[in-house]
Amino acid sequence: MFVFANLVEALATITSYLLTIYMWIIIIRALISWVNPDPYNPIVRFLYQVTEPVLYPIRRRLPFIGGIDLSPIIVLLVIMFLQVFLVRTLNEVAMRLRMGGGL
């Protein structure tokens, strides 16, 4: 059972890292949007391609508030929630499996 516990713990760690990386990508995208970025720059294109599928549906549902895009804040809050809830839950499951208990 310890092998499955290690697998769940590794999954929690990788999930935490991926969420942190995506959080920084969202932050960088929001900062870049304050200036007039070159849309043909490969970095800017990458940031838009990676974040737009997540930001667009949220942006579409939020009311327009004086030119301020609140969708990155909403996505950051969701990422923080997932880091607290999902990653902690996976770590707790791994700990219980390691101790010999069930789910």
Image (cartoon, helix red, strand yellow):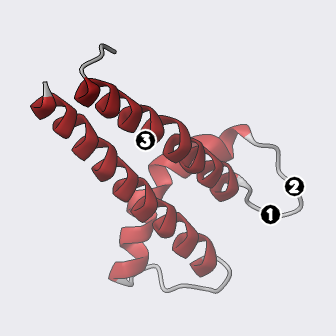
The kind of secondary structure element at disc 3 is: helix
Q: Residue 13, relative to residue 24: is it above or below?
A: above
Sequence-first disc among 3 and 1:
1
The disc labelled 3 sits on which kind of residue?
Val
Q: Residue 38, relative to residue 69: is it above or below?
A: below
- How far is the residue under mark 1 from the one under mark 2? 6 Å
x, y percent for residue 69: 73, 60
The residue sitting at 40% across, 32% down in the picture is 92
Q: Select label 3 or label 2 by which is in front.
A: 3
**In the image, farthest residue toward the right:** 66
Left or right, 57 with reference to 15: right
Left or right, 76 with reference to 73: left
Q: Residue 1, relative to residue 8: is it above or below?
A: above
The kind of secondary structure element at disc 1 is: loop
The disc labelled 2 sits on which kind of residue?
Ile
x, y percent for residue 100: 24, 20
Q: Are marks 3 and 2 in contact (CB under 8 Å)?
A: no
Quarter occupied by residue 8: top left
Q: Which residue is mark 3?
A: 87
Q: Which residue is mark 1?
A: 68
The residue sitting at 87% across, 55% down in the picture is 65
Front residue of this view, candidates 67 and 93: 93
The residue sitting at 21% across, 32% down in the picture is 5
Q: Residues within 10 Å of mark 3 (few under 14, many from 20)?
A: many
Q: Which residue is mark 2?
A: 65
Q: Residues within 10 Å of mark 1 (few under 14, many from 20)?
A: few
Q: Which mark is residue 88?
A: none
Quarter occupied by residue 41: bottom left
- How far is the residue under mark 3 from the one under mark 1? 31 Å
x, y percent for residue 99: 27, 27
